[in-house]
Amino acid sequence: MLVPPATSWRAAMLGGQQPSQHGQRLGDRAVLKQGAAKRKDRVFVWGFCYSGALGVPSFVKPDVGWKKPRRIQPTPYRLETEEKISSAACGYGFTLLSSNTADITKVWGMGLNKDSQLGFQRSIRDRTKGYEYVLEPSPIPLPLEKPQETRVLQVSCGRAHSLILTDSEGVFTMGNNSYGQCGRKVVEDETYSESHLIHQLKEFDSRVVQVVCGQDHSLFRTKKGAVYACGWGADGQTGLGHYDITSVPTKLRGDIAGVNIIQVSSYGDCCLAVSDEGDVFGWGNSEYLQLASVTETTQVNVPRHLPFKIGKIKEAACGGTGNIVLTEEGNVFVWGYGILGKGPNLIETAVPKMIPPSLFGWSDFNPDIRVAHVRCGLSQFAAITNRGELFVWGKNLRGCLGTGRMEDQYFPWRVTVPGEVVDVACGVDHMVSMVKSFT
Amino acid sequence: MSNGFLVFCVSVLGIGHGNKLLTDLYNCHLTKVYTVGGLLGKATDDFSDTGKLVEKTTFDHITREKLERILAVIQGTNHKALLMHSNIDMKTQEAYELAVKGLIRPMGKSPPIITAIRCLQFALPEFQLEVHCLHETQQYLRKIVHEIGLELKSSAVCTQVRRIRDGVFTLDDALLRTQWNLQSIQNAIWDCQLKVKTELEKTLGHQDKIHLHKMDVEMAHAADS
């Protein structure tokens, strides 16, 4: 029986390129080589290619005649970027990348642009027209008052709209506004494609420190610990006590009134918020048991405290049908519906279930390993350990897990990335990660 | 161990009925543990410090932290290989249960796999690693040292490979040359009985309970004789 060749971990490090073979005989004279110094910041992408969301034009339009277009990139692929990327967000078929730079260009977008979620991308062939699909990271010009001073801190993407958070000029919104998700009045029969309109939001109780896009709604968290929302509300996802649309960011009350919220999350129609005391609150869709621990109603339009007895919560993430939290102790809990990460037998639960730490590499041999961050896409989960390892699980829609296999993954599985993973953004069918090279 | 490469190690011997046990233990595909010595700054043709010099490199930029990052990658990639070569259907609840317990491992032929690796000592230009592996060869362990050197943007050779554990048997169970007499050997067999039985039960138990009963009888005989 043929034994397959030994695992080439170095091939994994080089992201698919072949490592140079040993055996470069240099004769009797030995050559003195200098070692390198600084670690480099890198971006890796994987998942569905045809939307252009991965930012690699040759996947969609091969630059060499005989090559075929690549529909799916199943493993992490390095994306060359001009600047160091500090924030990334995956929308439904598009991506935003931003840098904390003082340079004029601070945000780049790629992928679907039919609703101008990437701003107006002027076509080269016809300067009056804009691109519907953007195949490579393209600058998004922002109407900044102080373009050489203001910094972009964070970006977020939903189904067809985007939010860009700055340090001193508030939040900029772009894309579809049919439900007021961009925080401005809904204009009847507005055409969103090839639109130049970028709206600016500044009226909050204090500086906005986090922006989150749900499917068709937007959440804003301020320095004072308040949460504002606007957009589609049929599932109660705006948390404002009604089920209508809202076109002006409005402060949420309910169980989070007066509470210092330090993190919010959403991606579908369910929302979670974490307080400074380690409590978690939820509102929005509960058709998949996301909030069943406190109510039987499937739409919750006011923030409710979820009295889980699992320890203080540090971070939460919401997907389409499943939720995940990370506790102060470093434990990971999941609940909701779908592939939750505890094997095929667990498809739904209203109460959080812990994913054993051994699945993230913890063992007697490695007792210091902890999960540092948890993230959610529409139907997949991701966890990053304190060693910079990335684990994924859930539905492998169009290769979005990055495992190199096309099967769904029922428990946490390592993604081989040539570097230390610093953060990851999950979308519907693609993912983007920010990585520091090893040496 | 060949090539005149000095290796002090744990070697497991079977006597009489014990030979059958050796086969069973082999079928458990348990890991062996080695301490591996490395020396930064040069590369040789056979990856050992006695080989023909190919290249010399600087190594001042190397820190223990950098080395440990590389070790984390090696461990991660190999962990994946471990799961993939185990031939278990990943979509089953059984696969999940085994993964949680860390019991997924190849039960047939597979390429060398490192199940765990860590840095025991680091003092430029030398370092010492502890390596847990399956189906390894000495050449493979030396090559790992060489590749670590390359990945650190330098070069390294292997100075020592020492097996300190073979499955359930550790250095503590090993008999020194001076103890190669009947009484010591008998005591050693007796001491190891329980360990061997437990391991076989844990790994092969779900496969063949009848076989294990026969083994109980055999072990009792071995102790008496």
Image: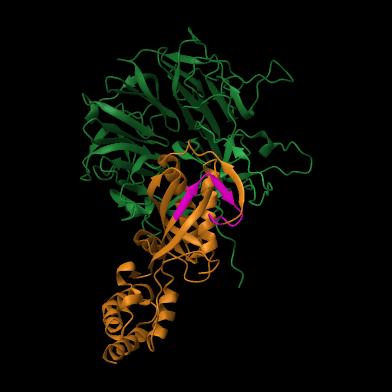
Q: Is residue A392 visible?
A: no
Of the 4 image quadrants, the one containing the N terminus of chain A is bottom right
Instruction: State whether residue A48 is above or below residue B219.
Output: above
The residue closer to the viewer here, A405 or B151, is B151
Where is residue A149 drawn, in percent x and y?
46, 10
Considering every residue shown, the one lying at the far right of the view is: A65
- How is the protein colored in the picture? by chain
Q: Which residues are magenta?
A: B37-50
Q: Is B125 situated above or below A223?
A: below
**Which residue is found at the position 50% from the left and 61% from the top?**
B84
- Depth check: give the residue in front, B16 or A256: B16
Query: Residue A100, how many percent across, how many down?
Result: 47, 21
Q: Is residue B3 magenta?
A: no
Name the quadrant containing residue A326.
Answer: top left
Q: Which chain is orange?
A: B
- x then y, percent, for residue A3: 59, 67
Rendered shade, chain A: green
Left or right of A424 in this view: A62: right
> A350 or A395, which lies in front?
A395
Q: Where is residue B112 drawn, in percent x and y?
A: 51, 63
Q: Does residue B63 appear in the picture of this structure?
A: yes
Residue B42 lies in the magenta-colored region: yes
Q: Which of the 4 image quadrants contains residue B183?
A: bottom left
Q: Looking at the image, which residue is at 20% across and 45% down?
A: A309
